[in-house]
Amino acid sequence: MTGPARVRESPTPPAHRRGDGRPDVGADAFRRALAAHPAGVVVVTADSGGRPVGLTATSFTSVSLDPPLVAFYIAATSSTWPHLRGAGQFAVNLLTEDQRDLAARFARRGGDRFAPPTEWTPGPGGTPLLGGAAAHLLCRSERTEEVGDHWLVVGRVRSADVHRPTRPLLYHQGGFGALHPLP
């Protein structure tokens, strides 16, 4: 019987050092280790001055029940970030296992993500709501904080609508997948 595979340090020296002077884990090893952790897939959308914007996120999580808070992280280099930051509110569209093409479309740079075949309707305040999502959470931006090379975005959930209780879309080992419950 063999033990679990060990993630090895990248031969490239990392840029950061811990307080004890030893280097932090390398970026490649860090990515490989985190790829072992499956994550739910959402698309975060907002209205930016009358123009819909959005991006795919796998860093989405609940934060608090009282008050109802959720959060996600966005790369500081994201071209969508300035538009989301200025919007004041956003929607979290929880994707289903049959929406991998939609997730991929919103993960790519450039292009009109809201052009057909994307189905969407304007929600409260013009916030885009994607068709076919399992649920929509309409959120008011509560707090943002720069953390490393990303921004933490915390939103207060103003409304939550569940449309299709179905299997979620997941991201694992560098690709999309679905949850299949154990017998």
Image (cartoon, helix red, strand yellow):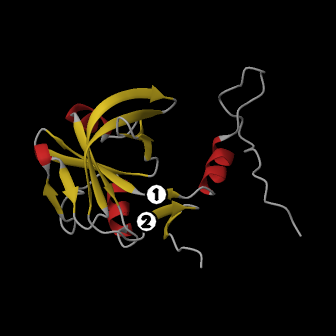
> Residue 65: x percent and y percent?
40, 41
Circle 2 packing at 10 Å, graded few (<14), some (14-19), many (20+), is many
Q: Residue at x 18, y 67 (%)?
A: 116
> Residue 172: x percent and y percent?
55, 61
Q: Residue at x 45, y 52 (%)?
A: 58
Which mark identifies residue 181? none
Report helix, strand or loop for mark 1. strand
Query: Does residue 76 appear anywhere in the picture?
Result: no
> Residue 109: x percent and y percent?
34, 51
Question: What amino acid type is highlighted by mark number 2?
Answer: Leu
- In the rendered structure, the answer to whether residue 177 lies left or right of residue 79 reads right
161 over 126 or under it: above or below: below
What's the distance in space between the residues labelled 1 and 2, CA to CA?
Answer: 6 Å
Q: Are marks 1 and 2 in contact (CB under 8 Å)?
A: yes
Question: In the picture, which quadrant includes the N terminus?
Answer: bottom right
Report helix, strand or loop for mark 2. strand
| Residue at the disc numbered 1 | 40
Query: Does residue 7 appear anywhere in the picture?
Result: yes
Question: What amino acid type is highlighted by mark number 1?
Answer: Gly
Within the image, what quadrant is residue 144 found in?
top left
> Residue 33: x percent and y percent?
66, 51
Q: Residue at x 78, y 27 (%)?
A: 22
| Residue at the disc numbered 2 | 169
Circle 1 packing at 10 Å, graded few (<14), some (14-19), many (20+), is many
136, 38: nearer the viewer: 136
52, 160: nearer the viewer: 160
Count of labels shown?
Answer: 2
52, 130: nearer the viewer: 130
